[in-house]
Amino acid sequence: MAASRQNRPVRLGGPIFLKSDDPAELAREHRKLGYSAAYCPAVKPGDRERIAAIEKAFAAENVVIAEVGAWVNLLDPDPDKRAKNLAYVAERLALADAIGARCCVDIAGSYDDKVWYGPHPDNLSRKFFDATVENCRKLIDQAKPTRTKFTVEMMGWNIPDGPDSYLRLIKAVDRKAFGVHMDVCNGINCPTRFYENAAFIKECFAKLGQWITSCHAKDLSWITELNVHFQEVIPGRGKVDYAAYLNCVAALPVDAPLMLEHLKTAEEYAEGAAYIRKVAAGAGVTFA
């Protein structure tokens, strides 16, 4: 997907390390780092005054709230834990709507009883698919969001594990408030997708672009062993084709943010952001 006049500026974002609770200071820090998108600052769902203050301060700096994370297991094999997790995600979805975030994001979950996102033989089953459809509908119907979307990320070993299964999930959920959170690295789960990741990225955006609300920025390196082992690394230290990725993000019908994640230090985030900006300059992609 080549750069064109139709491409819009990309909103890059990531975590910040400023120790402050002041919404205005937090918003300015994002701009200081060259970010025009942010993860939702710490706020309790019922704190209307702080929610309004965050929304106002970030809008003043033209920094959008990309996502409200809800990282729990929606398919926990323990029914009590599953019910508690569903209630938590409904609360997070309501917060995302109240603060005007682009999406509330989780993964579909896992039947693994040890690691909440772990592999399990039933994670690609019809049972898993049907349960995920039920969960997504229930959450959306309960929270009734009007300004945000509920999304689940692709994962390498559960549904959705690629653009086709994601498309089937969208059609099955059948809710306008259900969207796509694009993390291409999570979908690269085999050598073919790794070697041909530019083609995989373009396929994801071609099939899912109209529903994409926000994206994650990571990179993957292949650790040489006697089996396949991909490892997340700082953008620029792996093999993900960022020219393809950035052009796809820039060509979306909405300005879906691209959010750096899973790094450890401010220096690592600065390195990743610098690499993305360098690739963008060569690809003709600009930033908001």
Image (tube, rainbow, N blue to C red):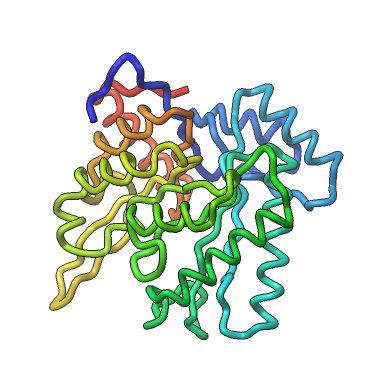
Question: Is 23 placed above or below 2 here?
Answer: below
Question: Is 129 placed above or below 7 here?
Answer: below
Is residue 193 visible in this depiction of the protein? yes
Whether residue 279 sits left or right of residue 99 in the image: it is: left
Give coordinates of residue 238: x percent, y percent: 24, 51
Question: Is 125 placed above or below 107 here?
Answer: below
Residue shown at the point (46%, 52%) measured from the top left? 171
Give coordinates of residue 127: x percent, y percent: 47, 77
Is residue 264 visible in this depiction of the protein? no
Residue shown at the point (48%, 35%) measured from the top left? 256
Give coordinates of residue 174: x percent, y percent: 54, 52
Residue shown at the point (40%, 30%) measured from the top left? 252
Give coordinates of residue 124: x percent, y percent: 38, 73
Whether residue 22 sits left or right of residue 126 in the image: it is: right
- Which image quadrant for residue 4? top left
Whether residue 277 sits left or right of residue 147 in the image: it is: left
Front-most of residues 113 and 19: 113
Residue shown at the point (13%, 78%) measured from the top left? 226
Question: Quick one: quadrant of the N terminus?
Answer: top left
Residue farthest to the top, as pictured: 5
Front-most of residues 72 and 222: 72
Q: How many numbered badges does the structure rendering display? A: 0
- Which image quadrant for residue 273? top left
Whether residue 186 sits left or right of residue 20 in the image: it is: left
